[in-house]
Image (tube, grey):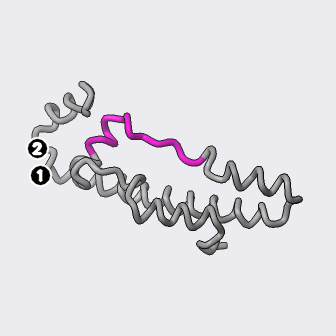
Amino acid sequence: MADNRTTDLWDEIDCADSCEAVIALCELVDKLVKDVQHLELECISTRYLLSQHMDKEQGELLRQDILENLGHRFADDPAYELYRNLLYAGGDPMDFRDYLVKVRMASQGDLPCWH
């Protein structure tokens, strides 16, 4: 549900769905989100590989916490919500199934690391 700040953004930019500057900024945010996804997957894959070279107990602890302390999520940010609404009808690409499948694969060592 949109908070007042997001509603204010929609009111402020009443041409949000057709304004070229807003669309260009949203497209930039989309590219940045894709970069974050790539970096998170690389981090997860690297953590998994590292866990294979640790003693059994430490490796298990790392695998249990493999998804901890990744990128900050911006779901509550009004600008991010505007981006999601304009480009993805309110959906969040950080929660899309194809990305979450890759996260699961990387956390199990089934997605190669891109070193």
Tell which of 60 and 106 is nearer to you: 60
Amino acid type assigned to the residue bearing label 2 in the image: Cys
Q: Distance between the residues labelled 1 and 2?
A: 5 Å
SS for tag 1? loop
Amino acid type assigned to the residue bearing label 1 in the image: Ser
Q: Nearer the viewer, residue 20 or 54?
A: 54
Q: What stretch is highlighted in magenta?
A: 70-82
**x%, y% of residue 53?**
84, 65
Asked if the stretch drawn in magenta spans residue 80, the answer is yes
Q: SS of the residue at dot 2?
A: loop
Q: Residue at x 50, y 56 (%)?
A: 36
Q: Horizontal and vertical percent for residue 90?
A: 25, 47
Q: Where is residue 1 in the image (x, y as percent from the top left)?
A: 26, 33
For the point 43% across and 61% down, the residue is 34
Asked whether, in this view, residue 41 is left or right of residue 21, the answer is right
- Asked whether the beta carbons under mark 1 and mark 2 sit within 8 Å of each other, the answer is yes
Q: Does the magenta stretch include residue 32?
A: no
Q: Classify 10 Å Cα crowding around label 2: few (below 14), some (14-19), many (20 and above).
A: few
8 is higher (above) or lower (below) than 30: above
Report the magenta stretch's main SS. Answer: loop
Question: Which residue in the structure is indicated by mark 2?
Answer: 15
Q: Name the residue at 11% across, 51% down.
A: 18
Residue with the mark numbered 1: 18
